[in-house]
Structures are given as C-alpha cells and as structure tokens.
Image (cartoon, rainbow, N blue to C red):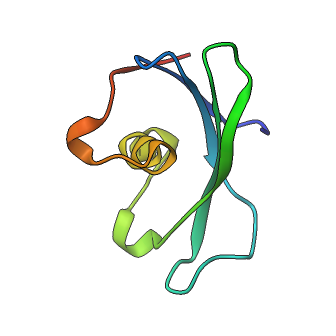
Amino acid sequence: MRNNTVRLILSTGEFLEYGFAESDFYTEGCDSAIDYTLYDGNYEEKDGGQMDYNSKKTHYKNLLDAIPDIIMFALSIGRENIPQYYII
C-alpha cells in the first residue's frame, strides 16, 4: 500500500489496509476506486483488490468516510455484521 492509507484492526483479529486508488480501470457506472488488502491475525495477506464506486453517490470526503463500506466489501458482509474496529 502507498501513503495516505488507513489501517484498521478488526475485532475479528484481521487487519485491513486501504487507500484511494489511482487506477483508470473502473467497472461500468463507477468513476473512482479504493484499493484494499485484508490480512489475517498473523499479518499474512488473505485477500485484496479494488472496490469501485460512484463518487456522486457515495460522497467520500476522506478515507475515514469509507470505513463501513470497505469493511463490508472486504469481508463480504452486510451492514448489520460490521465488526468493531480500531484505526492504527
């Protein structure tokens, strides 16, 4: 991950790092993206990728605004199942 990255410790024991992407490759209907990497409790990479989004609909002013959405996306869960987290 590059600078301007948010790092979270999830209550599941996992770590999540993410930041705004610089890519020009987005899915249809999206104009922006967030790169993320999900790590297990031993800080070994479990998953990673890119969450594309439409900036006119999400209105992320900064990376902290995206926390619930990126957690749901990275863990493939619903809003009601978002684990507690700490920003590090």
Q: Residue at x 44, y 40 (%)?
A: 71
Residue 50, image x and y in percent?
Answer: 64, 58
The furthest residue to the bottom: 28
Q: Quick one: which residue is furthest to the right in this view? A: 2
Say which residue appears at 69% left-offset and 13% top-offset: 42
The correct choice, above or below, for 23 with respect to 82 in the image is below
Q: Residue at x 46, y 42 (%)?
A: 75
| Residue 21 drawn at (x, y percent) | 69, 57
In the image, farthest residue toward the left? 80
Where is residue 85 shown, x and y percent of the image? 40, 21
Q: Which quadrant holds residue 34?
A: bottom right
Reply above or below: 12 against 3.
above
Question: Where residue 18 appears, x then y in whole percent?
Answer: 62, 40
Q: From the image, which quarter does the C terminus lie in?
A: top right
Q: Count of labels shown? A: 0
Residue depicted at 55% across the width and 86% down the height: 28
- Location of the N terminus by quadrant is top right
Q: Nearer the viewer, residue 21 or 9?
A: 9
Residue 19 as seen in the image, left or right of residue 68: right
Task: Say which of 37 and 64 sits in front.
Answer: 37
